[in-house]
Amino acid sequence: MCHRAPACGGTLRRCALLLAALFPLAVAFAQAPAASRNQLHPDWRHIGNSTVDLALASPATGAVERAWFSPDGARLFVRTAAGRVFQTVDFEKWQPSAATPPEAQDSVRVPLPEGVRAVRSNLLNPQRLYALGQNVLRSDDGGGAWTSVTAYQRSSIIGGGMHDLAVSPLDSDDVVVANDAGVWRSLDGGLTWTGLNDSLPNLPVRKLAALPQGSRGVRLLADGAGAIEWAPGEKQAWRSVSAEPMAAEETSARRALAATLTADPAGLAAERGAVEGIWVDPKDSRTALAALGGAKGPRVLRTINGGQFWDDLTADLPEGRAHGVVADRATGAVYVATDRGVFFTRSDLNAAAPPTNWSSLAGLPEAPALDLRLDSDGNQLFVALEGYGVYAALAPHRLGSLRLVNAADFSQRPAAPGSLLSVLGGRVRTARAGALDFPVLAATDSETQIQVPFAVQGGSLFVALETGQGSFQLALPVENVSPAVFIDRDGTPLVLNADSGVLLDAMSPARSNGRLQILATGLGKVRPAWPSGRAGPIDEPPQVVAAVHAFLDRSPLEVTRAVLAPGYIGLYLVEVQLPALVNAGPAELHLESEGHESNRVRVWLEP
């Protein structure tokens, strides 16, 4: 975590917990037993949950085709459209199950209304019947009269596509419905409904559409929901957004691949399957990788001549379809998403050479990996898992391949005097540029925090790093100021309510005429001068020398102070005043200083 003084005080009392979430990122390598030496163990984090806001009675999830109670009514089972079975005993948490659904059959025989195809009841109250059609119907007189309990203005409050219905053997008012939007339960005979989808790993994910950038969160393409986003600061569910078009390079590569495979000049196996994913080198579109959906045979292909010929990189990759592929050109790292999980190897992307053996990336839930991407700098790996959604971790190829990034947002923006940097890929013992020592504040085997000395001058430096793997020199551009707002690994900005110290997010928005505290780095020198490597003082912290400006949706805000963050090293505290009236919803916030803009972050507002 960020180095801090024994006390923080004021509204920054929560910062230790907030900043601890940023560090460290770890990956364990082969200190494992011989049987598992082909496994890598990234420190995965789950982004978002498994539900989507579809404006129904509760957040929804993917299609569920069966639902049934155990004979004693103590457990509820469901089977998803993907064929996985789960059970719950508390109707909140779901666990995988090996149970087999009973044969679907009606428990009673009565005349059914038009469009109704199934009827359920329990032995305790045979006059209470439930039926499935376009909606859920209820009868209290053994089928003489029926009333819809889910219809509202020509639609269903729990979604459509009804598949199954189960009545608890203990209570005829306790009914569960499985449909295209998940699992739904009523405890009052259908008068009110609640989703049981919050912890059911059934998100209908297909592909990663976009990674977090600026104020945008990670985006997915999902069956039945289109494009969805987990926005920075979101706490409840994925939400619908506009779909983004496929990159022109990817479209071109897909066409070239399709033409090549149709001609089959390389004599590839017939069972290769369809093209399910493709990666195109952003610096040379002639180089591309493709993931094929065959269970056997070639499943990872490479071209270095624009698709005229393709090499097979499958090697010892376990059987199972490949759904997505991505690479880091600088290191030759290749990652593939398959039915058996995520696998990693290295290969020369510039020449026709076979890869080394594939290693599995352990620690993910047991589910097919449907897609994966690296961020623009090749530092973080994002994986889309069937049912579970998105997981992310420091990319394993980054270990031993050190990279200097801004600690606030992982970007490679220039540094500034006093700013905080992260060295990704290893534990740094000492850092030095010429006669200047860079204080080492915290270190793990995968990441190290260092501070840029306040005495550094603008220009370009080479920072000499001493690590357990040897010595490295990394280039570091330096400006007088280079502002960056701190965000956590999922893009939530460290912006607090100045009066309560509460971190702002979708559940705790800022309000009109309120004051915000923004944690940032890269604001440069302070007055009076302050020693590098020492936490800012609690009382009368030094003020930033350069003028700092703040903007909300491009409109200027009043900056009431900009100082070193009390009790922290390399952090600055910028306090701003909101207008007397703000619009409800998300807004874009950023800082500027001496013509340099920070990253743009999303904050949530209420009038």
Image: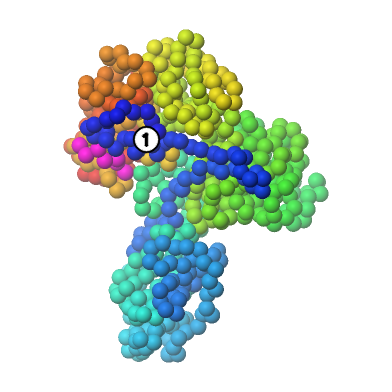
Pick the residue in front: 234 or 270.
234
What predominant SS class does the magenta segment belong to?
A: loop
Q: In which image quadrant can residue 41 be found? A: top right
Residue drawn at x 56%, y 66% is: 83
Seen in the picture, residue 424 relative to 532 is either above or below; the reply is below
Residue 48 spot, x, y in % from top left: 42, 49
Determine which residue is flagged by label 1.
19
Residue located 45% across and 15% down the image: 437
Can you give x and y, in whole percent of width and height, for residue 485 in the image? 36, 31
Residue pictured at 69% horizontal, 52% vertical = 318
Which range is magenta? 499-505
Which residue is pictured at 42% across the width and 25% down the height? 441
Mark 1: amino acid: Leu
Crowding at label 1, few (<14), some or many (≥20) Cα neighbours within 10 Å? some
Total numbered badges shown on the rendered structure: 1
Query: Residue 601 in the image: x percent, y percent?
Result: 37, 36
Q: Is residue 219 magenta?
A: no
Q: Is residue 203 left or right of residue 138?
A: right
Q: Quadrant of the N terminus?
A: top left
Q: Position of residue 498 (x, y in %)?
A: 23, 35
Q: Residue furthest front?
A: 33
The secondary element bearing badge 1 is classed as helix
